[in-house]
Amino acid sequence: MRWLVGLCLLASPAAAVTCKDVQHLGASYTICDVGVDEDLQLFLGDDDGNVLGSFRAVENYHGLSLSFAMNAGMYHDDRSPVGHYVEDFIEQRSVMSREGPGNFGLLPNGVFCSGETFEVFETLKFLEQTPLCADATQSGPMLVIDGELHPRFIPNGTSKFIRNGVGTPADGQRAYFAISNEPVNFHDFATLFRDHIGVPNALYFDGKVSRLHAPQLNRSDFGWQLGPIIGVVDADQ
């Protein structure tokens, strides 16, 4: 992490990002496993405030190579974040805790925080604990909350989309980013995190626009312009 440079000599060697395709409840998913020692960052705009919007634009603008990336939370028509957004310790959007329309307002929602550890917080817990995040993005709904599925999810839900999200284990040493490779409902996507990956907390990023950049799988999705993007900067560039 950028702000842990002084601790790097005490840290264990960084493990490379690993992405793999899996099957869960008859559907295909791709899961990318990121260790806390990786250089995970959020990206939104350039110095003039123009939203970058794509994996290639992030790489070209910053002059870097991403070993993993995906869209990272819901955004408005101008592609600005709907909820809390912190990039390199600078808060660009404050926390939104009220109910609202759409999936973001399907409470409880949550915040993914990248700091000394990775952690998915339910939004009210995030406000109570006020953790220091180098990068943070708010989205919703929560998929898994302390080992339980979001109470509004139903097993045979008919609303199915390509979906993506992130989950974190209790020790905060890893983050698991997942995307469905075919349309799935909220319930099945949430059980991927709870039952297949085995994490106590997971957060939904988005659906329909969900995309993944995973060079090791020879994959870099494209299409609609994105808002926030999360990615790991390749240390070997």
Image: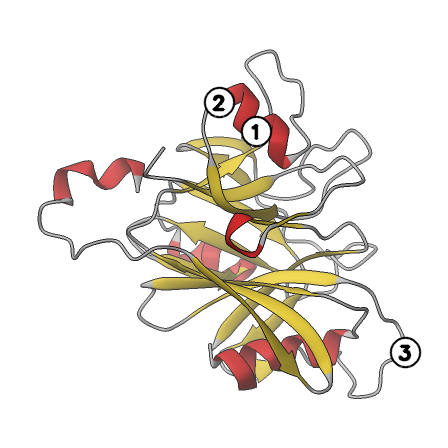
Query: For the point 39% across and 40% down, which residue is it?
Result: 234
Mark pair 1, 2: CA separation: 6 Å
Which residue sits furthest top?
A: 48
Please report contact status of discs 1 and 3: CB closer than 8 Å, yes or no: no
Nearest-to-viewer mark from 2 and 3: 2
Nearest-to-viewer mark from 1 and 3: 1
User: Measured from the top left, where is residue 34 in percent x and y?
Assistant: 41, 58
Decide: is 200 above or below 36: below
User: Measured from the top left, where is residue 93 in percent x and y?
Assistant: 58, 34
**Mark 1 secondary-structure assignment:** helix
The disc, 1 or 3, on the residue closer to the chain's N-terminal end is: 1
The part of the image, by quadrant, that contains residue 158 is: bottom right
Q: Amino acid at mark 3?
A: Thr
Identify the residue position indicated by label 2 in the image: 62
Q: Amino acid at mark 2?
A: His
Please report contact status of discs 1 and 2: CB closer than 8 Å, yes or no: yes
Identify the residue position indicated by label 3 in the image: 158
Identify the residue position indicated by label 1 in the image: 58
Mark pair 1, 3: CA separation: 35 Å
